[in-house]
């Protein structure tokens, strides 16, 4: 009996630990659209936020081009969305300008300071998972 109770307690703790991990499908997903590609397509460059019904509605698709933009967008969201973080997918590093690369580095430094989980992956390496900041 004691071992069954111990097992049940262990399973409950393990389940709560797993439930507490950020999940991409409950957070903010974005693609880092390079400026040179955006210029060709006539779209803004930056973090192109993917629509999800649980995100606060916007007049158009959000393109975030600064740490300030990202923080303002994230702060509008429900607490549960913020807790699940920002998930960014990039393309080849050479596709981004120096300005964009600096933005990404600042983002990687600033979001953790604001207790916003940040996850980063190159599209071609998604099978390896996201890196956490």
Image: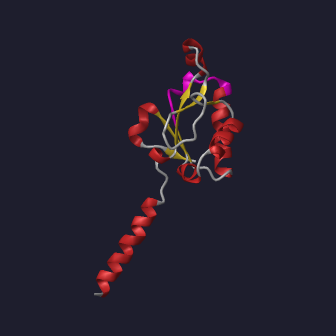
Label count reads 0
Residue in the foreground of this view, choosing between 124 and 111 = 111
The quadrant holding residue 35 is top right
Residue at 44%, 60% (x, y): give it: 19
Residue at 63%, 35% (x, y): give it: 104
Residue in the foreground of this view, choosing between 126 and 13 = 13
- Residue 22 is situated, as x and y percent measured from the top left of the image, at 49, 52
The quadrant holding residue 95 is top right
Question: In the rendered view, would you say 13 is above or below 50?
Answer: below
Residue 114 vs residue 14: left or right? right
Question: In the rendered view, would you say 41 is above or below 49?
Answer: above
Residue 71 vs residue 122: left or right? right
Range shown magenta: 88-99
Residue 91 magenta-highlighted: yes
Residue 124 magenta-highlighted: no
* Residue at the farthest right position: 68
Residue 130 vs residue 61: left or right? left
The quadrant holding residue 36 is top right
- Colour scheme in use: secondary structure
- Residue 27 is situated, as x and y percent measured from the top left of the image, at 51, 46
* Residue at the farthest bottom position: 1
Residue in the foreground of this view, choosing between 34 and 74 = 74
Residue at 56%, 28% (x, y): give it: 61
Residue at 60%, 33% (x, y): give it: 58
- Residue 84 is situated, as x and y percent measured from the top left of the image, at 52, 50
- Residue 43 is situated, as x and y percent measured from the top left of the image, at 58, 18
Residue in the foreground of this view, choosing between 25 and 106 = 25
Residue 101 vs residue 16: left or right? right
């Amino acid at each position: 009996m004691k071992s069954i109770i111990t097992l049940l307690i262990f399973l409950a703790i393990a389940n709560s630990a797993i439930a507490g991990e950020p999940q991409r499908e409950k957070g903010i997903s974005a693609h880092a659209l390079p400026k040179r590609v955006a210029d060709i397509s006539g779209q803004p460059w930056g973090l192109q936020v993917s629509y999800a019904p649980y995100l606060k509605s916007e007049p158009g698709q959000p393109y975030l081009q600064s740490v300030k933009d990202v923080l303002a967008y994230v702060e509008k969201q429900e607490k549960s969305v913020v807790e699940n973080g920002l998930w960014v997918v990039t393309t080849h590093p050479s596709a981004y300008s120096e300005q964009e690369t600096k933005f990404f580095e600042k983002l990687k430094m600033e979001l953790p300071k604001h207790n916003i989980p940040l996850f980063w992956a190159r599209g071609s390496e998604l099978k390896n998972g996201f890196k956490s900041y």
